[in-house]
Amino acid sequence: MIRNILFANVLFLFIVTIGNAQEKQMFYVGTFTTEGAEGIYYCSLNSQSGEISLENTFKGVDNPSFLRLSPQNDFLYVVTRATPQVEPSGGFISAYQVGEKGELHFINKQVSNGAGPCHVDVAPDGKFVAIATYGGGTTSVYAVNENGGVEPALTVVKNSGNGPHPNQKSPHAHSIKFSLKGPGIFSADLGTDQLNIFHFENGSFGRYEQGFVKLPAGAGPRHFVFHPEEEVIYVINELNSTISAIKKENEKWYVFQNISTLPDDFKGESNCADIHLSKDGQYLYGSNRGHNSIAVFKVNANQKLSFLGTVPVEGNWPRNFGISPDGNWMLVANQRSHNITVFRMNHETGMPEFSGKQIDLPAPVCIEYQ
């Protein structure tokens, strides 16, 4: 009898422990240390309550403005901004090994080949990383070695051109992603109103035959997201607060819709930042800095968007946000109010609903789920 009771107690504790572990969704937070942050923060999201807890702080990383995990979550790649005195080229791409408890172990770094590195992506096979620099207007691709470190850049492309907006006096590469379909890399350049298209295969990198998709003058493309099933890309435009929908037909990409992220009656200043699709691909979300909201769209059967409305972010300057891997939560990183706010996803309406939960963190600018 005693043996059975002991076994039952051990089994109960085991089940509780496993349950608690499953309730936690871990994520890293990139920040601006020039605005009071200490480096990269490691947090947990309770998938039942929406509570956020700070688990660890990795100090000594200067302005880790964007983060991306490898496909197996064993390495973290970080673009960091540096002063000219520290690095004349403007910054670095750094590689870290991820420990069993999420701890970060520095491997190495390479120069960013341009000022203001602002975005990084990892190839689906984990063998390459690519970065974009805002100040330099460059895109670079790096090979990843066996221990997860980055080799010197395989290639560096310097964009050219400008636009009609005062912020478009020169190229500003703002994001870069490996294609989900076929060998390619896409990069949004805010300064030239272009979504650039590169061919990339087995380490070979060059302009795709089409070269780029031109967006409306003064739009300022910033971030973008691939439709999970169709050959469609949604680009969020910082300068004119719109989303451009781009489709591929007969081997050519073209814009088939431009739609505002703001209510018709809004008259103030606002700049878009980040963009994400819901897990099921039925809804699209974009962040408005200034209006301080998340714009919500329905993705229709023809991939066109219908504006459903906006949700206040309960903070100031939502630079970045992320939907949890289970699709049930949205975390919004509000740079200027120094907080991350938590929203429960309503799967029937597509509208995020504020949970009342938040955490105070200095200058959060990127969320990367583990």
Image: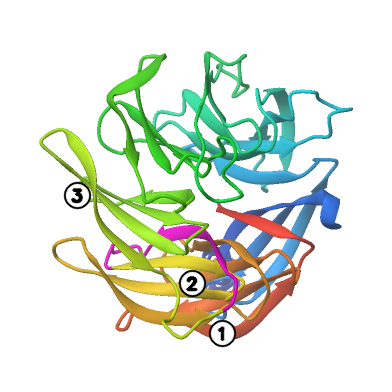
Residue 329 badge:
2
Query: Answer yes or no: do the residues labelled 2 and 1 have beta carbons within 8 Å?
Result: yes
Q: Secondary structure at mark 1?
A: strand
* 332 to the left or right of 65: left
Between the residue at mark 2 and the residue at mark 1, the CA separation in whole angstroms equals 9 Å
Amino acid type at circle 3 is Glu
Q: Is residue 100 visible?
A: yes
The single residue placed furthest to the left in the displayed view is 250
Q: Which residues are magenta?
A: 268-282
**Residue under circle 1?**
355
Q: Is residue 49 left or right of residue 101?
A: left
Neighbours of disc 3 within 10 Å: few (<14), some (14-19), many (20+): few
- Figure quadrant of residue 66: top right
Pointer 3 residue: 230
Q: Taking 160 as reference, is 232 above or below it?
A: below
Q: x, y percentage for residue 31?
A: 73, 53
